[in-house]
Amino acid sequence: MGDDSSASKTAFNDNSWRLLDLPHDWSIEGEFKKDSPTGGGGGYLPTGIAWYRKEFVLPSSVHGKQVSIQFDGVYMNSEVWINGHYLGKRPNGYISFVYDLTPYIIKGKNTLAVRVDNSEQPNSRWYSGSGIYRHVWLNITNPVHIAQWGTYITTPQVDSASATVAIKTKIENSGQSKSNAVLISTIIDENGHEVANGKQAFLLSAKSSDECSQDIPLAAPALWSVGEPNLYTLRSTIIVHEKVVDEFQSTFGIRKLEFSNINGFLLNGKRVKMNGVCLHHDGGCVGAAVPVKIWETRLKLLKEMGCNAIRTSHNPVAPEFLDLCDKMGFLVMDEAFDAWETGKVKNDYHLYFDQWWTIDVRDQIFRDRNHPSVVIWSAGNEVPDQTKDRGVDLLRGLLATFHWQDPTRPVTTANDDIAADNGQTKLAFLEGEDIVGYNYANRWHERRELYYSLDHQDHPNWKMTGTESVPVRNVPAYSLGADKSMVKANYASGMIEAEQLWEFVDVHDYVIGDFMWTGIDYLGESRWPGKAAFSGQIDMTNRPKDGYYFYQSQWSDKPVLHLFPHWNWPGREGQIIPVLAYTNCDTVELFVNGKSYGLKVQEFPHQGHSGAWNKYAKPYVGVTTADLHLSWDVAYEPGTIKAVGRKNGKQVIVDEIDDQGNVVPDADIMINFTISGNGKIAGVDNGDTRDDTSFKQNSRKAFNGHAFAVIQSTGKQGDILLTVQTDGLREAAVTINAQKTNSTVMDFEDLR
């Protein structure tokens, strides 16, 4: 940490510096402080300036080849040197970028230096992290090679019988002489079978580049969808003088996208409602340097919730995040910016927008355009420019760039002022968008009840989606109020607005979908003593909250029945306590210590007559509520509450809560973690957004009876022993076996 300009020089002595592994986020290692310059936006964590240096030796076989370095993300204002030569600066902390090292590589020791400046605060409305927080890649190619992000794969014709795979491949010749070459494009299915190929010869002049276009027919394609995310691999091979000089593999999916002002979104000809969440990029206690396993765990939870769509709020995400979305079947709204020319905080991206937006958008599109999961581009979130004539011009330029580089996907922005009293989004702004994005469609006046219908009536050609909306409002901890003489439950009404919105979205096909804020709690956007936003349906320790089961009950087909709150209320005997349930069952009966508190009945969507007067397609049910949750008023007595859910008269699911469970819901004891073997504790947490204990300590107070530790391998194979200890309870331990994974990626040190 600190700023020494001589650190860019090869001869600089860095022997006293700390050795660390990338990716690395230095902010998450710090202490939470109320007076931190980041404020609540940055989660009250430190930032500053830091340098990174890496010395490496390349083998003699690299002589005459092209060497480049790719950074997947550096926050922010990164500057890079190789052997003392300045390569450039990228202000945007979320964009991936590449530098050519070839002219400056030497035999023997090479020195890479990176300066990261996150000192000008505040520059973000949420936690950004600081440092080289995403992966870094050293790419080595022959002079004739496929360009960086040089393959572009689309599927202009798709049905179940056949598909056309259109491939554009940019090839560069950095050598001193022209080259006759052949490009072979081979399509490989998930079983490793070669299912189609194309071949094209080309002549490339010295120091030039060209693009080869190929249309390859494919019979009986396995289509990519949210339920069956089938993937193919394109192997691009360049042959010069009958020798393979470059080979690159690109993953893609075959699918057909349609967006309609009447039918919403159709995937492969079938209407799909986007059941979406917004996500920020941090991983809780590990900060912005998120191991892929954490994202895999989180996305599995979201998938089980019934979520099928993700908005990357409000910036390009790590490439491996999109890889997971491809594999797991998520639809992605890939967002670019939180600010254009008009800023939201003093030092945000508006300072750099005019100079850098075209470069950043280009790099985002080139990097992400082959991902089948990416179905919509978002050019911005709640940009203040939406209410200005200048904003119309800016949008026009952004749309032109997106359409030029990728005409296959529509572009939206997330607009929060469409019906605002204090300055509305310009009509020309909305008319210019491919899809009109609504942040909080029900925020203003009669839209609280009418939602999108007013604009659908006035602008019937608009395609519409909710880009951000109110979620089920969960509570950090259940409470019946401070006054024990009466009950004032804090958990009984936070779902109503979200339920009403979903009832509208679900039954109006023209609404493409909805992205609620947010899927998972995230660092920042908080007020002291809070360090994080609590709006997620999953907390930062990957634990589902009550609201998770509301969405699961509406978005998934499996039986869902979730009771809350807990049933441990000493001193409240005899008081009437609301007991709630989220469910997709037809009926639910509640029992307290074996006594029935009655049957509750719900139905959504409500069915009308079918075939004849007073006839129904499904058995008629006499509903007891128009809400999407069930509720009972229960006189508290210690013991057990149990709910029995039925569909079509058959019992399908039971949920039971007692006062003798293994989890003590209000426990806040200190838990200590120790580790030995080939692992380390990457972070500890408990899900409490108001706990300001450092994530890097090896102890944590329980919150709602829960604590959490992230264990990371040191890169060596062998056992890791984690021991957990607390006063008054028996010590527990678990052994984890770390194994080497097969990878085609080499470490720097392996190049020798």
Image (cartoon, helix red, strand yellow):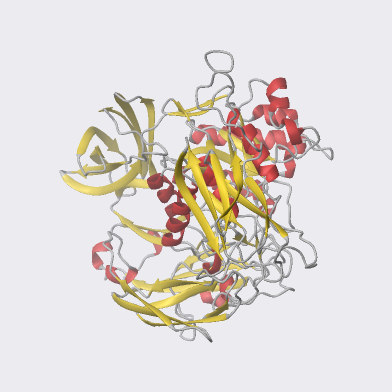
Q: Residue 90 location in percent, x, y?
A: 56, 57
> Is any part of residue 310 visible from this angle?
no
> Is any part of residue 385 visible from this angle?
yes
Horizontally, residue 228 falls left or right of residue 331, namely left
Q: Residue at x 51, y 81 (%)?
A: 698
Q: Residue 170 location in percent, x, y?
A: 36, 40
Q: Residue furthest left?
A: 242
Q: Choose between 99 and 366: the one closer to the eye.
A: 366
Q: Residue at x 55, y 27 (%)?
A: 620
Q: Residue at x 55, y 40 (%)?
A: 587
Quarter of the figure with residue 563: bottom right
Horizontally, residue 421 falls left or right of residue 451, namely right
Q: Residue 519 location in percent, x, y?
A: 57, 51
Q: Choose between 660 and 358: the one closer to the eye.
A: 660
Horizontally, residue 723 falls left or right of residue 141, namely right
Quarter of the figure with residue 296: bottom left
Quarter that holds the N terminus: bottom right
Q: Choose between 121 and 35: the one closer to the eye.
A: 35
Q: Residue furthest top?
A: 612
Quarter of the figure with residue 567: bottom right
Q: Residue 383 location in percent, x, y?
A: 70, 44
Q: Residue furthest front?
A: 595
Quarter that holds the C terminus: bottom left
